[in-house]
Amino acid sequence: LATHTLTVPTEALGHIAPTTVYPWSSAMEMAQSVRDLGALVGREAPAEDLAKQLEAQLAVPPPSDGPKVLLALAMGGETDGQVWYIKRNSLHGQALHAAGAQNAVFEDVDGAPAMPIEELLKVDPDLVIVIASREGVSAEEIAALTAPFERITALRATQTGRLGALSGGALFSEGPAILDLVTALRSEITRLQAVGR
């Protein structure tokens, strides 16, 4: 069993044993995979409960009145003039919708989601939340994640002080722990929206 990502050597695994690849790029795909796995191991009822929970919490449209949030990645984007971000047509993009926000980049993106600073200024999100995968970072390190955006003074989110950051390995989960990301995002969005009020 494997999730379908570019980093999983599914062909090599297939030489060792029969391998089934499950796509987990959306809430509906994840829920169906959970049901399939539950049937495979004889745990249909708990699998169905989890699948319904995933569908109910993640498979929701973006809220029409939610803030426009750029969910930016902390790694690899600031030094080369590119900002890497979470695209809306992804599992983590659905988590942002479930947290009550619209993705500031409001169209589906094929391939790696990155934009130059000039494009970021056109997008001009209400909030920017930077996410990093490191565990156990200090408050100072969390604050430093937003530093590249603080230097872009033309951004509305910078001008209003609505730059936030979250860190932790679970934030990048492609499993049911992604529901923890929804909770963390909802809390950070609420905190940032209260800034300046």
Image (cartoon, helix red, strand yellow):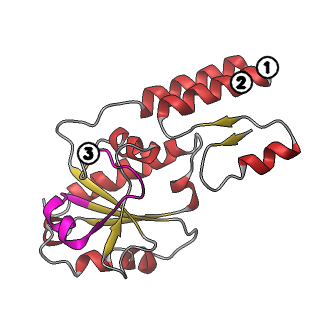
For label 2, the crowd category at 10 Å Cα-Cα, with few meaning under 14, some 14 to 19 and many 20 or more, is some
Q: Position of residue 9 (x, y in %)?
A: 72, 52
Kind of residue at badge 3: Glu
* Rendered residue at 71%/24% (across/down): 38
Q: Disc 1 versus disc 2: distance between alpha carbons?
A: 6 Å
Asked if residue 110 is among those painted magenta in the image, a careful observer would answer: yes
Please give the name of the residue rendered at 23% of the width and 72% of the height, measured from the top-left corner.
Answer: 117
Q: CA distance from mark 2 to mark 3?
A: 34 Å
Q: Quadrant of residue 22?
A: top right
- Residue beneath the point at 55% across and 69% down: 134
Answer whether labels 1 and 2 touch (C-beta < 8 Å): yes
Q: Is residue 33 above or below residue 67?
A: above
Q: Is residue 109 magenta?
A: yes
Q: Which residue appears at 58% of the width and 39% of the height?
A: 176
Q: Residue 107 shows which numbered tag?
A: 3
User: Which of label 2 and label 3 is nearer to you?
Assistant: 3
Work out whether residue 169 or residue 13 is closer to the camera in this orientation and state it: 13
Q: Quadrant of the N terminus?
A: top right
Label 2 sits on a secondary structure element that is helix
Residue that mark 1 sits on = 42
